[in-house]
């Protein structure tokens, strides 16, 4: 399987819909991912970012926990189908990507991204977001000043020891669980 991956054979399959990789090292440089992908699940993703050529418009879930990147993607690319982002434990993550082109996110898990210092302000206007997990993001100092999340049910800020203020929450109040232990709020 490893030599198959190194040759990149299946990665060039334009019809590939689901990609789940269990490879933490000795992976080839990734230059192509199918634009038909619905699920990208790669614990320990070893590269600095997703390939620039990747067109993620069909992605529904990005599960890249314990990955090596500082920012998963840099360009604004349409991701209107994206519902789940899990970057848990990605210790090199410094800032979240821009969420402007991903308005349908329902679950955003950034737990234990210890170097995360910046959360994109557009997270505050994600109307379908139900879970925002920032537990253990020790470098996070602030969140957007106003959050208009109509569907937010669970907000986890536990262990964000440098977080000093809590954003104003606008709109319909759906918040069922709020965790602030280990913060300076």
Image (cartoon, rainbow, N blue to C red):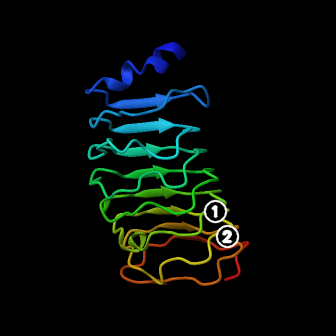
Residue nearest the viewer, comparing 37 with 109 = 37
Residue 1 visible in image = no
Seen from the viewer's position, the closer of residues 70 and 138 is: 70
The quarter of the displayed image where residue 12 is located: top left
| Residue at image location 39% in from the left, 41% down from the top | 51
Q: Quadrant of residue 148?
A: bottom left
144 left or right of 158?
left
Residue 135 tag number: 1
Residue 30: image x %, image y %? 44, 33
Residue depicted at x 26% and y 54%: 78
Name above or below for residue 28 compared with residue 1: below
Dot 2: within a 10 Å radius of its alpha carbon, few (fewer than 14), some, or many (20 or more) residues? many
Determine whether 54 is above or below 145 in the image: above
| Residue of label 2 | 160
Image position, residue 103 (x, y; %): 31, 62
Q: Residue at x 62, y 69 (%)?
A: 157
Is the C-beta separation of discs 1 and 2 under 8 Å?
Answer: yes
Query: Left or right: where does residue 44 sit relative to residue 77?
Result: right
| Distance between the alpha carbons at the discs numbered 1 and 2 | 6 Å
Tell me which label, 1 or 2, sits earlier in the chain.
1
- Dot label at residue 55: none
């Amino acid at each position: 399987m490893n030599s198959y991956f190194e040759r990149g054979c299946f990665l060039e399959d334009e019809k590939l819909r689901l990609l789940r990789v269990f490879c933490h090292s000795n992976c080839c440089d990734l230059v192509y991912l199918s634009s038909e992908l619905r699920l990208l699940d790669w614990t320990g993703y070893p590269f600095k970012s997703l390939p620039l050529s990747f067109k993620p418009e069909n992605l529904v879930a990005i599960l890249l926990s314990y990955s090596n990147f500082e920012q998963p993607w840099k360009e604004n690319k349409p991701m209107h189908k994206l519902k789940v982002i899990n970057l848990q434990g990605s210790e090199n993550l410094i800032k979240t990507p821009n969420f402007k082109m991903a308005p349908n996110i329902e679950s955003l898990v950034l737990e234990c991204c210890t170097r995360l210092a910046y959360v994109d302000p557009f997270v505050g206007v994600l109307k379908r977001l139900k879970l925002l997990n920032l537990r253990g993001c020790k470098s996070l100092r602030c969140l957007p000043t106003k959050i208009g999340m109509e569907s937010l049910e669970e907000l986890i800020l536990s262990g964000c020891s440098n977080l000093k203020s809590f954003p104003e929450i606008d709109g319909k109040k759906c918040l069922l669980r709020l965790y602030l232990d280990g913060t300076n709020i």
